[in-house]
């Protein structure tokens, strides 16, 4: 098997850590000696051993003289666990093949340098694009100190997110909804506006077998979240943040007593300052957000330049109605050339529905 083949194996291993390692990267490692795979491992859970150490711990024979394939540059600093470079050097491995460099300033080429200084051959850039794409969340988070935001919505083919009476269950089919729960598992948090809580009283949990519930974030400028809502009632079991501009202790206390965490944020144009909120959430180790808000919050997020990716689930049905809501409200742009532009589109069929996933071209808008 070639270096590419072994790296593909390491990538598949890395994907097993999806949803469990945030805000760390997903990493996989394979150890090969004389054409035989003698060890495999991946980063299984935040705070636990990294892929390289797990692979070494599972070796069927001595790794001395072997090659290690790892999707991300090995760390060379002490964090929750000791540096992986030390374990690699001590193991007697003589060759390390790396997928992508680690953008973390504590690593950023220093892991490679340390291996070379200890006489280990290093090959870089094998399946680099695939390895980097796997950790787009980590790369964004570590470089910008803000969460990676995915704006998700479901609409009909004529662009409606609800009927003229406001009903929206269900626009898409079961397969598409299952995919949403996979993303609730993948991303660290889910964010909605208070209007969604009032209208739908959602739980915002992950209903995928073996999945992890995301941290829940409610944007509530004036603390109008109902105290009897499902979200407040379950705040002791599922981490729940309420971002608010309300500083009245009397209004805050019932939410604190219920187990909610309050993040006080300034206002911008009468609403939560989303750019400020992103910085505060990053300090809470929230590296990614699935934005499932309504049309108003979606526009505010785009206008604040916090959205990195858009997921548009399109159902093959038409609602019609001049007053039926579309996915993005707000004032809108005045001219087509002022639009929020999207690029790098991926299209998937999910049952009878279509998912279009696109990256946002941030330089077009805001002051990003």
Image (cartoon, grey):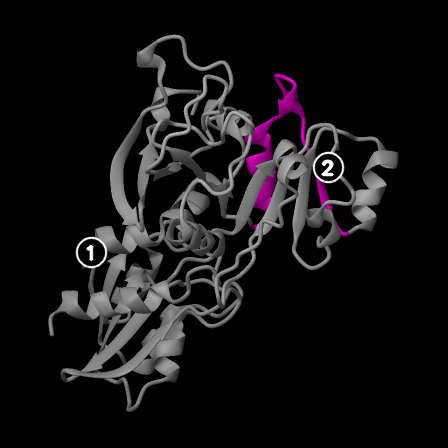
- Per the image, the residue denoted by label 1 is 125
Q: Nearer the viewer, residue 262 or 310?
A: 310
Q: Quadrant of residue 241?
A: top right
Pointer 1 with pointer 2, Cβ within 8 A: no
Which residues make up the magenta segment?
Answer: 259-285
For the N terminus, the quadrant is bottom left
Residue 54 position in % (x across, y down)? 40, 77
Q: Nearer the viewer, residue 151 or 285?
A: 151
Residue 195 position in % (x across, y down)? 64, 32
Looking at the image, the residue that sits furthest to the bottom is 61
- Per the image, the residue denoted by label 2 is 225
Compared to residue 238, the image places residue 356 above or below, namely above
Q: Say left or right for 287 vs 103.
A: right
Decide whether residue 274 is among the magenta residues.
yes
For the C terminus, the quadrant is top left
Q: Nearer the viewer, residue 364 or 343?
A: 343
Compared to residue 60, the image places residue 308 above or below, namely above
Residue 190 position in % (x across, y down)? 54, 45
Q: Can residue 167 be seen in this view?
A: yes
The residue tagged with tag 2: helix, strand or loop? loop
Compared to residue 211, the image places residue 137 above or below, namely above
Distance from Cα at disc 1 to Cα at disc 2: 49 Å
Mark 1 crowdedness (10 Å alpha carbons): few <14, some 14-19, many ≥20:
some
**Closer mark to the observer between disc 1 and disc 2:** 2
């Amino acid at each position: 098997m070639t270096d590419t083949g072994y790296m593909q194996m390491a990538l598949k291993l890395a994907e097993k850590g999806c949803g469990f390692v945030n805000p760390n990267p997903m990493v996989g490692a394979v150890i090969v000696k004389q054409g035989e795979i003698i060890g495999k491992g991946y980063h299984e859970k935040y705070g636990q051993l990294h892929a390289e150490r797990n692979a070494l711990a599972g070796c069927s024979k001595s790794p001395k003289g072997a090659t290690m394939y790892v999707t991300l540059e090995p760390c060379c600093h002490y964090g929750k666990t000791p540096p992986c470079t030390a374990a690699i050097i001590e193991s007697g491995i003589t060759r390390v093949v790396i997928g992508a460099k680690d953008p973390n300033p504590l690593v950023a080429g220093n892991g490679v340098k340390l291996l070379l200084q200890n006489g280990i051959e290093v090959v870089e850039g094998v399946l680099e694009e695939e390895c980097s794409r796997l950790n787009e969340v980590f790369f964004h988070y570590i470089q910008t100190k803000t969460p990676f935001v995915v704006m998700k919505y479901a609409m009909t083919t004529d662009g409606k997110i609800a009927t003229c009476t406001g009903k929206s269950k269900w626009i898409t089919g079961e397969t598409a909804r299952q995919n949403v729960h996979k993303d609730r598992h993948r991303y660290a948090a889910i964010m909605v506006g208070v209007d969604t809580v009032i209208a739908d009283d959602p739980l915002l949990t992950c209903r995928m077998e073996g999945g992890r519930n995301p941290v829940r974030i409610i944007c509530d400028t004036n603390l109008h979240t109902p105290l009897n809502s499902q979200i407040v009632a379950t705040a002791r079991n599922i981490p729940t943040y309420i971002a608010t501009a309300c500083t009245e202790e009397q209004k805050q206390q019932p939410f604190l007593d219920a187990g909610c965490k309050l993040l006080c944020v300034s206002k911008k144009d009468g609403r939560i300052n989303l750019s400020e909120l992103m910085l505060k959430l990053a300090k809470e180790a929230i590296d990614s957000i699935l934005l499932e808000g309504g049309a108003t919050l979606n526009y505010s997020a785009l206008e604040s330049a916090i959205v990195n990716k858009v997921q548009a689930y399109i159902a093959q049905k038409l609602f019609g109605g001049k007053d039926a809501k579309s996915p993005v409200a707000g004032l809108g742009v005045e001219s087509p050339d002022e639009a929020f532009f999207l690029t790098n589109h991926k299209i998937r069929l999910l049952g009878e529905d279509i998912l279009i996933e696109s990256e946002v071209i941030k330089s077009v808008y805001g002051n990003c």
